[in-house]
Amino acid sequence: MNLHRQKNGKNNPKGFYIALGVCLVAVGVAAWTTYDSVVNYAAPRQGTQSEAQSKTAPANNTVSGVYVEPESSKPETSSKKSTKSAASSKPKSSESAKPASEPAKQTTASVTSLSYPVGSRTIVQKFSLDPVYCKTTLDWRAHTGLDLSAKAGEAVKSMAPGTVTKVYKDDRYGNTVIISHGTVEAWYCGLDQTRVGEKDTVSAGQEIGTVGIVPIEKEEASHLHLATKVNGEFVDPLTLLR
């Protein structure tokens, strides 16, 4: 029997290798099946299981490591948003158009400097909020204007474009013309004759009167008393004249 088995074992070696190959194939198939199952579980295919999870996932959550923003929370597209903002910010043609008379008003309102109202720039008495001696009243008082030397009868001219707000005779300063030059209100005092009336529109350099006498300063040399106000407060005319 032993001899018979040894004979058969020596004569049939192929059977052993066939059985071994079958075993290796079976092991390989089992390994591949296990790997494929693990991969499909860890990374589901797009459009199948992952799509179902994204539909049921709560807002601002992640699906398979990717942030998913709910459709309802997305802002409007830039094209729609820019169209709306452009439509709302675009001014109406009626608002942008300005009447022909507007530039004159802007010129008056933008006055920042004034020309001299008389030919001379010689100063008889400076502006001073501190008391100065007055030769006529023989006392000390603030001098809220600027006295410019000028001959009697000399033309007094508007220092800038403006509107006459008042023409009257003052007991202390004589005939006075008040003109609004935008933000500056100018008082031309001590006039002999006046050439304008209230609400008249004047241009720069237009004659508004002639030099006369300032009653409260009649002991001074012949001059024009000029006062200026900004925001209701007296300011030194020299800071505005050019």
Image (cartoon, helix red, strand yellow):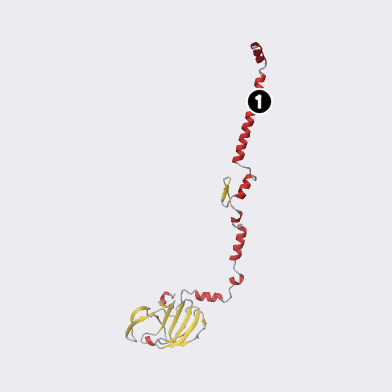
Q: Position of residue 157 (x, y in %)?
A: 47, 81
The residue nearer to you, when weighing 169 against 239, is 169
Q: Position of residue 163 (x, y in %)?
A: 50, 81
The residue nearer to you, when weighing 196 against 86, is 86
Q: Residue type at mark 1? A: Val
Mark 1 crowd level (few <14, some 14–19, many ≥20, 10 Å Cα)? few
The quarter in which the N terminus is drawn is top right
- 123 relative to 93, above or below: below
Q: Position of residue 134 (x, y in %)?
A: 34, 84
Describe residue 210's horizontal placement relative to residue 49 as left or right: left
Residue visible at 61% across and 48% down? 54
Say whether residue 157 is visible: no
Residue visible at 65% across and 11% down? 3
- 111 relative to 76, above or below: below
Q: Residue furthest front?
A: 1
| Residue at image mark 1 | 22
Say whether residue 84 is visible: yes
Q: Secondary structure at mark 1?
A: helix
Q: Position of residue 58 (x, y in %)?
A: 58, 51
Residue visible at 32% across and 84% down? 139
The quarter in which the C terminus is drawn is bottom left
- 42 relative to 144, above or below: above
The residue nearer to you, when weighing 76 against 238, is 76
